[in-house]
Amino acid sequence: MIEVVHNEERQSTGILLHGLGSHAGDLQPIAQAIASVHHWLLPQGFFSLGDSVYAWFLFPEEHPSSVWDFSSISFIDPPDLTETAKKLARCFQHIKKPCIVAGFSQGSMLAVELTHYMSIDVLILFSSALIAEQRWKHSLQLHGVSVFQSHGYHDDVLSIEQGKSLEKVLQLAGAQVTFCAFDGGHSISDKVISELIAWLQKLALDR
């Protein structure tokens, strides 16, 4: 677990979840850049894929995503997704409020799943996509949750159309979604960070 502390006396706590094939330290510069969240926690995926690369959950081996094709995953509901979310929720059951959960790519999908098991005030979803569609359309309850979602127009891993499909499901669940599209690929651009910082300041998390 990596921690980034901006202000020990303030309350807001963020959980930042890395993407597939990465590690806890990968998003540390993002946590360092976003000082309006006063205490960031960066856990590491539970499934090792090799030397310093991890996953939060695994896709079924028979699906094309097992060879890194994620173009059609909305119908997949990986069994590890729910178990990982429950495990993380137990780890973070005593964190201070308001609670912000952010994630990149696979980590952002886990962030959405976590809302079933934790009281979350803010979701930040970088380069995300809809999975578990049939379950999420009925199970997500996001009234009062503010969501910042970003996606690159030229993302060749998870298309922006997949991100927009997720946005629709989040809105149907009651979330207030701000969607930030940018001229880039499967990444977190400087524009996204700037707009996210401004968005968080408007939320006034410490009120």
Image (spheres, rainbow, N blue to C red):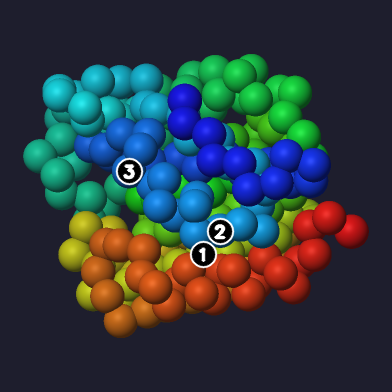
Which quadrant of the view contains residue 87?
A: top right
**Mark 2, residues whose alpha carbon is within 10 Å: few (<14), some, or many (≥20)?**
some
Q: Which residue is mark 2?
A: 34
Q: Depth check: 204 or 57 in front?
A: 204
Q: Amino acid at mark 1?
A: Gln
> What element does badge 1 sit on?
strand
> What element does badge 3 sit on?
helix
Q: Is residue 52 above or below residue 147?
A: above
Give the residue drawn at x 47%, y 31%: 2
Which quadrant of the view contains residue 24?
A: top left
In-image side of 54 versus 139 (left or right): left
Q: Amino acid at mark 2?
A: Ile
Give the residue drawn at x 41%, y 45%: 28
Give the residue drawn at x 25%, y 69%: 185
Q: Which residue is mark 1?
A: 149
**Mark 1, residues whose alpha carbon is within 10 Å: few (<14), some, or many (≥20)?**
many
Residue 117: x and y in percent read 67, 29
Q: Amino acid at mark 3?
A: Asp
Q: Residue furthest left?
A: 67
Q: Which residue is mark 3?
A: 26
